Amino acid sequence: MIKLYNSLTNSKQEFKPISASRVSIYSCGPTVYDRVHVGNLRAFLFPDLLQRVLRYLENIDVDWVMNITDIDDKMMGRFKAAYPEEAPANALGRLADKYTDLFLEDIEKIGIKRGDISHLPRATDYIPQIQSMILTLLKANIAYLSDGSIYFSIAKYEASGQKYGRLVSLNFTPQSRVTQDQDQKEGVADFALWKVRKTDEPYWDFEIEGQNLPGRPGWHIECSAMSREFFGGLFDIHTGGVDLKFPHHENELAQCGGAQANFYLHNEHLSIEQEKMSKSIGNTKFIDDIKDPIAFRYLVLSGHYRSQMDFNLADLASAHERIKNLRVYSDQLMLARVGQLPTQDSASIAQQSHRQFVAALEDDLNTPKALAAISLIEGKVFSEDAKELMRLADDVLGLNLVSDDPLHAKVLELIDNYSQARHDKNFEHSDKLRAKLLADHGLVAADTEIGTLVSRA
Ligand SMILES: [Zn+2]
């Protein structure tokens, strides 16, 4: 069984799903006010790896929900500038549509399959559910009204016997500036559940005991309402970048009166040339700046998700080389003809490699070790069980290595003729056939102990 590092307990724990047949995962998704940079992408690549490991290694079905934040402070800053002539609600919708589409394109480029995400709920489609949660908190006297906004009171929450600060240790001073929700709060860590309507901003009516409080939801409550909507109550795994531990996930824990998920998993940051990637520094990189997005995926997987990682062009270039070599090896196995590969290699290296691959991923998704396990066979072991492992690795790691296009009979004949010419030591002819394989079919021939193997150029 797989072990995962749970931020709730600060320890590696054996993962047992609530239902034996299906794992529920909620990932905090993007705020669609701008294009995501590669630093952001690490936080989406991580739950993709997680769900692939559960699906293909643990053979359990996955229900993966990722929200789209289409209303929060960042969105407010952008929609007017983007579509000044539109009514606020329309402008907001257009901004959200544009960047949701770009986000989905970007994650596809790094090997995240749209079909693997069961739901991509947008916050503005769940306003009644958000309001109902806020009402419950008001009735419980943990939330309070102030100048038309509604805040969550940390003091009242703690007075009810709950602990605020389960994911991080907190030490507030009166000067702490915790979030942008500073306006009319009673306590410094209190956060907005509902923000009073401002001129030229989209708003929703909110009827509370005969009083209308037009406004919009705060960011934290959105995720809690949406995860509750899709999973009912407790779910298995909540994921997000380490920057979401506080205040976002801490606030989610508080407003839900405890953990919504059994496991909270957080991935570390991706810096760029040793600096935090940020728009203000001007060092952001987008996936379109990268020629081979799968090499970026490889680069991220070459580090453990709980380790900080630096993005630089030298490492990206070597990741690109690694992918190229893995592709050649994978092709040689996949394109081998039926019966050409022995069932297993005499030294059982593929089996050893397979065991190490599984063990590494089951130990808190240790992808660097899993990739090292693949290196044991790469370019050296040509057997059916090596082929099986490469298929599994491709499903789990999502590196798009496996090509399943069978070779045409004419191409197979050409390969045969090439092999025969080499066997007959007619190298002039074999060289011509090798050149023809490359020029006409884009295939590179390699001579191995089990005969000729080919890969795509
Ligand atoms: Zn969230």
Image (cartoon, rainbow, N blue to C red):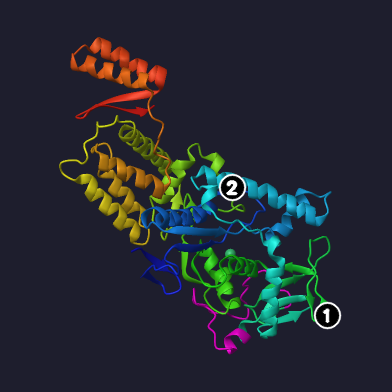
Q: Whole-Å distance between the Cαs marked 1 and 2? A: 41 Å
Give the residue type at disc 1.
Gly
Say if the magenta span includes residue 163: yes
Which percent across, then down, holds residue 445?
30, 24
Asked if residue 170 lies left or right of residue 329, the reply is right
Quickly name the residue at label 1: 210
Q: Along the polypeptide, which appears first: circle 1 or circle 2?
A: 2
Which range of residues does the magenta coloring cover? 156-184
Residue mark closest to the camera, 1 vs 2: 1
From the image, give the main secondary structure of the stretch colored magenta: loop
Q: Quadrant of the N terminus?
A: bottom left
Residue contact at pointers 1 and 2, CB within 8 angstroms: no
Q: Quadrant of the C terminus?
A: top left
Quickly name the residue at label 2: 104
The answer to whether residue 17 shows anywhere in this view is yes
Asked if residue 375 lies left or right of residue 108, the reply is left
